[in-house]
Image: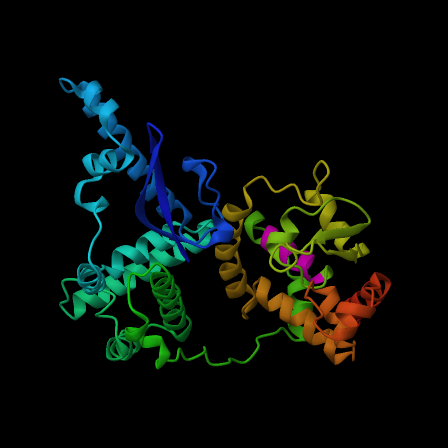
Amino acid sequence: MQQVRLRISHRGTNAWHPTGVMVEPVYFNGSNIYDAISKRAPMAMYKREQLAGIVRQYEEGIFDLLRADGGKEQLEQMSAKELRSYIFGEKARKQSAVQLVQKKKKTQQTADFMAFLDKYGQSKDKVRTRENFAYVWRIVFAYMQARKLDGLSFLDLDYERLVDMKAWLRSEGKGEPTRHKVESLMKAAYKEGLRMKMCSRDNDPYLDYRIEPVPEHDIVRLSNKQMHKLIAFECSNPKLQRAKDVLLSSFYLCGLNFQDLYDLPMDDEAVYVRKKVNRRTHRHTHVRVEPELSEIVMRYAGDGRMFNFSAGCRCLQWRLDGAYLELSKELGFKVNMAIIRRTWVSLAAELECPDYIINQSIGHIDRTVNGTSYRDPDWRLTAKWNRKVIDYVLKA
């Protein structure tokens, strides 16, 4: 991490003003002060605001000086260092080593972790990530109220505090996934604070504190009998019918995730790039459209798309989550997209489908040497085993 400095040029002289903004060189572009930090940099929005504020302070200082009586003549006689001192005052003066150490120590003692956690979360690109950080902020704030804490600085966040917070989360009935999310996102924000020199590595509690993983749970899948019941279930409610069709569409496409299912093109073969893991490699996955799926597609087909869903992807997914709960009550067992995906994988494994074919069929990356260097995916094998899984369910 390097500190960004503002260069002031005036009447052939130069001076540098430290901004306090830390950034990795790979994310820095000094050709434009308003776009100096890449949007991909951690906390890019927050750091850009800091730089913009310093530039505004400089511009306002020049404007105030020119408005004052004799200000123009005074400006013409100033050097860059004098101009810097006039605008930024004490911030621009050289400080002794003792003063710098005292200032650093004071900053680390008073740096508000909660404010930093909020800014760090808001700097994320994805809406879902920002929502997760906001959720964690609310939980940590509830913990502070329960412990009657007025604030939570970086220095307050020590090993004992983390242990106490974990005990409080469990006493409040928060599940292990929630506990893991809170601890993981807090750690991510703390580590970013370390990189920005807001706290000392000597006080890093995560050198000793280990975040416990979420305990493994039994994989929920549907039996052949339950799959028969789902396929044969007659829905008079259009909402439940659509939920059932989405579940079966996913099953007939090797357990396809809803996000990838939403934008599928209409053809005799579903070709897609799995958004979750293949966005960087842009590797396409191919699944043949079987006759059972064609019947469903005919009810929802749209221009150039396999499914003409009227609502947006996120909004439709929220509606379907509620429909899955109602459908589960009607069927007498739980159904959702994750369970359908696990069911397809489990049935393929029962039929002794090779692991590498299962991985390529559900859009996972094969990290073996053969998978990364030698073997090209054969999508005819995916079609073959998908047909076997569907026949295994229908004929059982």
- The span shown in magenta is 242-251
As for residue 247 lying within the magenta part, the answer is yes
Residue 292 location in percent, x, y?
77, 56
Image quarter where the C terminus lies is bottom right
Residue 111, placed above or below residue 366:
above
Q: Is residue 396 visible?
A: no
Q: Nearer the viewer, residue 78 or 64?
A: 78
In the displayed structure image, the side of residue 179 where residue 125 appears, left or right: right
As for residue 66 lying within the magenta part, the answer is no
In the displayed structure image, the side of residue 150 where residue 131 appears, left or right: right
SS assignment for the magenta stretch, majority: helix
Residue 211 location in percent, x, y?
40, 77
Residue 221, quarter of picture: bottom right
Q: Nearer the viewer, residue 213 or 230?
A: 213
Residue 367 location in percent, x, y?
70, 71
Q: How many marks?
A: 0
Residue 13 location in percent, x, y?
33, 34
Q: Residue at x 51, y 48 (%)?
A: 314
Q: Residue at x 26, y 75 (%)?
A: 158
